[in-house]
Image: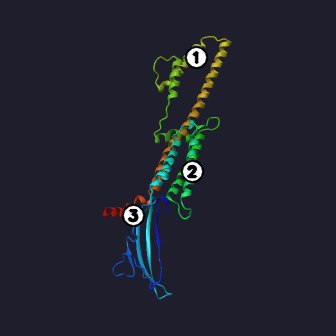
Amino acid sequence: MMLTFSLCACSGSWTYDGYQVDLHHIHHPPEKPESYFIEVGIDLQEFYQNVEWDIFGVSARRNEKFYTCCAEPYPDLTFNITMRRKTLFYTVNLIAPCVGISFLSVLVFYLPSDSGEKVTLSISILLSLTVFFLLLSEIIPPTSLVVPLIGKYLVFTMALITLSVIVTVIVLNLHFRSSATHTMSPWIRRVFLHVLPKLLLIKRPNVESLIMKERIIEGLGLKHRVDPAEFSDSIRSQLSERTDSLRRYTVNGDTRKAMDAVNFIAQHIRQSEAETKIIEDWKYVAMVLDRLFLWIFTTACLVGTMGIIMQAPTLYDTRRPLDVELSERFVRNS
């Protein structure tokens, strides 16, 4: 059963003794054979077009059968009415909103982790699909034999968004890690800081490092431009010169206390910068995971949507409804 894209065939029979009622269709062949088939067996000239169903077949067939219990023939006329549900209403009110909401789940991985709204967005999308699922359960007939296509798509989308919530929680856990709680493994550093960014075309900015180097260069009084490759050598040489110059002077107790305080502050700054670097590495790992799952979920949404919607039989049935064709023909003839 495919609800929105359903195709139904209804049949009815009328059985009597052939000696009592010799049942024939009004458009029967002249020779009146025992069995015959009429393609258009119902007059649709007075039929009003239905807002939900299209008629594609109204055939009639006469059969005559002898049963073992009786010597009389039993003729019957069987009328087959083939109908197909109109899909515009369900496409506009069910399918299009579900497709739109399912693609909103991709934006969860594009939203920055610092915004604090990633999990909120995921759960809001999941609740929206739950409302659609409850609405659909009231429309479709209760059966456990088959699942409608729109039901399959809703279940697929809800599973996808549930996975996005789980992945988002993992990404946020990585984003807010620090050196005080976690240690980054070498394989994580290699995979998420060096390998995956190249595959995902992500380039990590290094603006803070450049600004720090410029400040150190200005603080050391370097007049010329220092090449990054020679940066550490230049700092080392400048520091050694400053140290040699300080050794020429005799320092008193206050000066030594000041120097110890400066060394303590410098050591604290170095430790703070190392911790900040570790935190930034974890944030970068979370950003790489976000970009990776952005592409994965986008592909899954596209493939799943096309794979389920393309199973609809109406996409491949180009026949015109019989009631529309006959009504147009009747208008032209009149």
The residue drawn where x is 67% and y is 16% is: 257
| Residue at horizontal 39 percent and vertical 69 percent from the top | 43
**Pointer 1 and pointer 2: residues touching (CB < 8 Å)?**
no
Kindly report the distance in space between the C-alpha atoms of the residues bearing marks 1 and 2.
Answer: 72 Å
Front one among 42 and 313: 42
Question: Please, what secondary structure does the residue beneath circle 1 have?
Answer: helix
Q: Give the amino acid at mark 1.
A: Thr
Which image quadrant is residue 79 in? bottom left
Q: Residues within 10 Å of mark 2 (few under 14, many from 20)?
A: few
Q: For mark 1, does the 10 Å Cα neighbourhood hold few (<14), some (14 to 19), or many (20 or more) residues? A: few
Q: Say which of marks 1 and 2 sits in front.
A: 2
Whole-percent x, y for residue 63 in the image:
42, 79
* Quadrant holding the C terminus: bottom left
- In the image, residue 288 sits, relative to residue 10, either above or below, namely above
Residue at image point 66% right, 15% down: 256
Identify the disc placed on residue 243. Answer: 1
Whether label 3 touches label 1, CB < 8 Å: no
Identified by mark 2, the residue type is Val
Q: Which secondary structure, mark 2?
A: helix
Question: Which residue type carries mark 3?
Answer: Asp
Q: Earlier in the sequence, mark 1 or mark 2?
A: 2
Query: What is the secondary structure assignment of the residue under circle 3?
Result: helix
Q: Nearer the viewer, residue 226 or 319?
A: 319
Q: Residue furthest bottom?
A: 71
Q: Is residue 62 visible?
A: yes
The x and y percentages for residue 120 are 58, 42
Which mark is drawn over residue 323? 3
For the residues labelled 3 and 1, the Cα–Cα distance comes to 100 Å
The residue at 47%/22% (across/down) is 226
Residue 269, compared with residue 194, is above or below; it is: above
The x and y percentages for residue 309 are 46, 55
Kindly identify which numbered label has been placed on residue 131: 2
